[in-house]
Amino acid sequence: MDRCGVVIVGSGLAGMTAAYRLTKAGRRVTVLEAGPVLGGRTSSWVEGGMPVDSGLHKFLGIYRALPALLRDVGMDPHAILSWEDAVQIHVPDEPVHAYFRAAPVHKPVRTLLTALGNNRIVPPLAKLALTYMGAGGLRECAAHPLELDGQNVYDYARRSGVSEWVCRRLLAAVTQGVLFMPPEEFSAYAVFAPVLEGLKSGMTFRVGAFKGGMTDVMIRPIASAVEKLGGRVRTNARVTRLAVESGRVVGVEVGDEKIPADHVVLAVALKPAQELIRAALPDYSWFAPMLSLGTLSAVTVQMELDGPALPSDHTNFSTGALCCFAEQSRTTFTHARGRLSVILSRPGSSSTWSPGRSWSGRSRRRGASGCTWRAASRTTGWCDTRMISTPCGPGRRSCGRRRRRRCRGLAWRGTTRSSRGSPAWKARSCPASGRPRPSPDRVGACHPPV
Ligand SMILES: Cc1cc2nc3c(=O)[nH]c(=O)nc-3n(C[C@H](O)[C@H](O)[C@H](O)COP(=O)(O)OP(=O)(O)OC[C@H]3O[C@@H](n4cnc5c(N)ncnc54)[C@H](O)[C@@H]3O)c2cc1C
């Protein structure tokens, strides 16, 4: 095989960005992607006839590098996005939920009104405490970012006078929803840094959803631009080894195939990067901190319903194992009459989830990052639905372990007939709302790829 200028391992956003920038700079680039689909954690594919994607992806208005890349490859970011600009926070055991507009520049009045409202969930005194915390956090973030990174946001909030109740209900929902972690494990820096960036770039916070599967609307056009510039993009090409000579990486191996290269860019998730580096460069102390980092697990579950689950498409954060969900039938998966996408975090990871209500199913860890949970759920008192979780990578066949479980549900709306499921299951109504529960016609599951 010819020597490559640069081999890029991984076709996620990092790999494709590197590929585009390097081919544009005149390098000979080959992208090697382990899976059959491009995009990694921003990919979409068809699973058993059902379009799915690798997560409940939101495009934030404060992003700069991604819109710039999209424009460079000839795409208009607004053409592939639908701006939702709203976030709802579901609080377990509360009849009301908090609904915030999150677009200070684009919808200033509504953003202000929702910030001033929602008093049952965020009472005025709590707002004052949160404002005080926010001002202090932004100041420290600008002045001492590393020190702020050494603190978790729960401690930071409590020291700033935010009540335990607000931490448990509101803050936990946000940290779980954004990075799938409880506030005790969430760096205070990680909360304030994006806000600071947003302020610097003119308060351009917004929340956008993709108008279609991310591989289709975003990653494939970038890959085409790379190919037009002479780069190569290969799928089903898992790098099994980094080739090292005299302590220097001189290429990669894809099974039996050896691909020499002047440079190798490892644009994979942490766990596969650790595995490749550990095997090839075990003695480099420089890598030690990176090799000791832990990874985080999450499972996303996607359901097609025969009616919308929510009145509009916007992100919903919640606490506990269920950390984030959205109706996506009006934006991303428009072929479906209803489409609920849910991200589940580590069962029992949040102290906000009381034992009686915990995600009490079995779960099993697997080695690689991302797809580490096989969750068989049993929870109490909510609507019935089916969920599956499969430990498979994007594009791979589901391992087909479908389970029908009682799933702690949401404020289901809409109703419908079931095309599958037992008669008893069909007949039951949601104990929480009293309404007939929507019946998933088809259920799919996916998760971040290995
Ligand atoms: C469930 C979920 C929801 C998310 N939601 C959002 C969101 O709403 N907004 C947001 O901005 N971000 C979100 N993120 C984060 C965002 O998706 C990631 O930060 C981003 O996609 C990571 O891109 P990447 O290129 O670094 O890695 P990846 O996308 O993981 O790409 C790495 C690629 O490398 C490949 N690979 C791995 N090992 C090998 C190997 N040995 N050989 C060849 N290829 C290999 C993988 O198959 C993969 O395609 C979410 C993440 C998850 C998991």
Image (cartoon, helix red, strand yellow):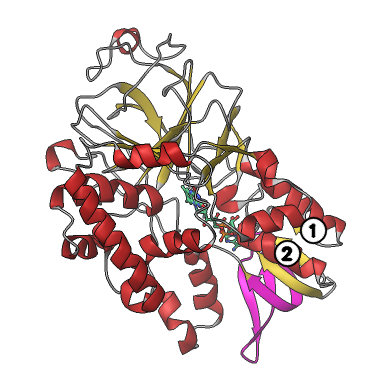
Which residue is pictured at 46% across the width and 26% down the height? 312
The number of numbered badges drawn on the structure is 2
Look at the numbered disc 2 and give the secondary structure of its residue.
helix
Say if mark 1 contacts mark 2, CB within 8 Å: yes
Look at the numbered disc 1 and give the secondary structure of its residue.
helix
Which residue is pictured at 62% across the width and 62% down the height? 14
Q: Which quadrant, please, contains the N terminus?
A: bottom right
Q: Is residue 105 magenta?
A: no
Q: Which residue is mark 1?
A: 226
**Where is residue 273 shown, x and y percent of the image?**
53, 69
Q: Is residue 133 above or below residue 357?
A: below
- Indicate the amino acid at tag 2: Ala
Quick check: which quadrant has ligand 1?
bottom right
Q: Is residue 249 magenta?
A: yes
Judged left or right of residue 79, residue 353 is: left
**Where is residue 102 shown, x and y percent of the image?**
44, 43
Q: Earlier in the sequence, mark 1 or mark 2?
A: 2
Task: Give the residues in magenta.
Answer: 237-265
Is residue 32 something one can see in this rendering?
A: yes
Judged left or right of residue 340, residue 361 is: left
Judged left or right of residue 134, residue 163 is: left
> Counting other residues with Cα less than 10 Å from the Cα at mark 1, is it few (<14), some (14-19), or many (20 or more)?
many
Q: Is residue 410 above or below residue 117?
A: above
**Where is residue 82 shown, x and y percent of the image?**
59, 36
- Indicate the amino acid at tag 1: Val
Q: Is residue 179 above or below residue 263?
A: above
Which residue is pictured at 68% across the width and 49% down the height? 219
**Where is residue 200 shown, x and y percent of the image?**
51, 64
Q: CA distance from mark 1 to mark 2?
A: 7 Å
Which residue is pictured at 65% across the width and 62% down the height? 15
Is residue 352 something one can see in this rendering?
A: no
